[in-house]
Image (cartoon, helix red, strand yellow):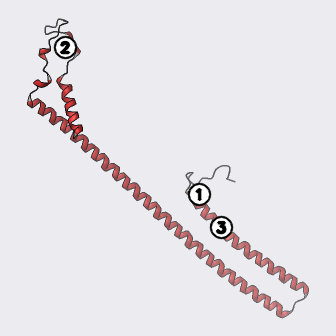
């Protein structure tokens, strides 16, 4: 309210004392003069009530237009803020879904690998029992032991390969989220 009063009084002060340089230099006959009559210009107190009312109305309209413009800008900014919040929530939901999918896939893969390990271990145990029934020679026992050790190493390497593949996929997905857009720096690329 105070700003309206200040704006109105400022505008009234400017409009009441509007003397131009050409009015000061030229008198009524077009003859230059150094004497200027200030009687032709109304003072602030001589404005009619209608003129004051018109100026107040026009200034009030201008202030109302500015307020409407600010309200519109505020509404626009609030709308944009809500859109940004919605986008962030959607990204969070998508990230959670991707994380759940990766955890599910990892669980399925580890379950599969465990089942495969159990099956291979059972077959190896059965093979060893059959080999013990035959009572092989010393060379055959060494070959069976070497074969068993190789099978254990093979099982370990397959497990490590599966886990590294999962880690690699997770690493690749985390790289895609980097600000570089998933591109690797030239120093890292092969």
Counting residues from the start of the chain, the first of labels 2 and 3 encountered is 2
Secondary structure category for the residue under label 3: helix
Q: Read off the residue under disc 1.
A: 175
Q: Quadrant of residue 19?
A: top left
Q: CA distance from mark 2 to mark 3?
A: 90 Å
Q: Read off the residue under disc 3.
A: 165
Taking the spot 70% from the left edge, 70% from the top edge, the residue there is: 160
Q: CA distance from mark 2 to mark 1?
A: 75 Å
Q: Read off the residue under disc 2.
A: 23
Residue nearer the viewer, 39 or 171: 39
Residue nearer the viewer, 47 or 188: 47
Taking the spot 79% from the left edge, 88% from the top edge, the residue there is: 128
Secondary structure category for the residue under label 2: helix
Which mark lies nearer to you, 2 or 1?
2
Which mark lies nearer to you, 2 or 3?
2
Q: Is residue 148 left or right of residue 2?
A: right
Whether label 2 touches label 1, CB < 8 Å: no
The quadrant of the rendering that contains the N terminus is top left
The quadrant of the rendering that contains the C terminus is bottom right
Residue nearer the viewer, 119 or 60: 60
Of all residues, the one furthest to the front in this rendering is: 2
* Label 1: how many Cα within 10 Å (few below 14, some 14–19, many 20+): some
Q: CA distance from mark 3 to mark 1?
A: 15 Å
Q: Relative to residue 188, is residue 61 depicted above or below?
A: above
Taking the spot 61% from the left edge, 64% from the top edge, the residue there is: 169
Q: Quadrant of residue 157?
A: bottom right
Secondary structure category for the residue under label 1: helix
Of all residues, the one furthest to the bottom in this rendering is: 133
In the image, residue 14 lies at what x, y percent? 21, 26
């Amino acid at each position: 309210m105070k700003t309206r009063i200040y704006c109105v009084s400022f505008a009234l002060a400017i409009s009441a004392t509007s003397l131009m340089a050409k009015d000061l230099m030229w008198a009524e006959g077009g003859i230059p003069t150094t004497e200027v009559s200030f009687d032709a210009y109304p003072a602030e107190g001589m404005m009619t009530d209608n003129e004051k009312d018109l100026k107040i109305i026009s200034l009030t309209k201008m202030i109302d237009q500015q307020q409407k413009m600010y309200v519109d800008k505020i509404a626009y900014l609030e709308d944009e803020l809500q859109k940004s919040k919605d986008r962030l929530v959607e990204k969070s939901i998508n990230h959670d879904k991707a994380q759940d999918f990766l955890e599910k896939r990892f669980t399925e893969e580890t379950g599969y690998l465990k089942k495969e390990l159990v099956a291979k271990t059972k077959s190896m145990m059965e093979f060893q029992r059959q080999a013990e029934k035959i009572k092989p020679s010393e060379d055959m026992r060494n070959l069976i032991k070497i074969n068993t050790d190789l099978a254990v190493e093979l099982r370990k390497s397959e497990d490590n390969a599966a886990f590294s593949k999962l880690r690699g996929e997770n690493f690749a997905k985390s790289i895609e989220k980097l600000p570089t857009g998933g591109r690797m720096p030239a120093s890292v690329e092969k």
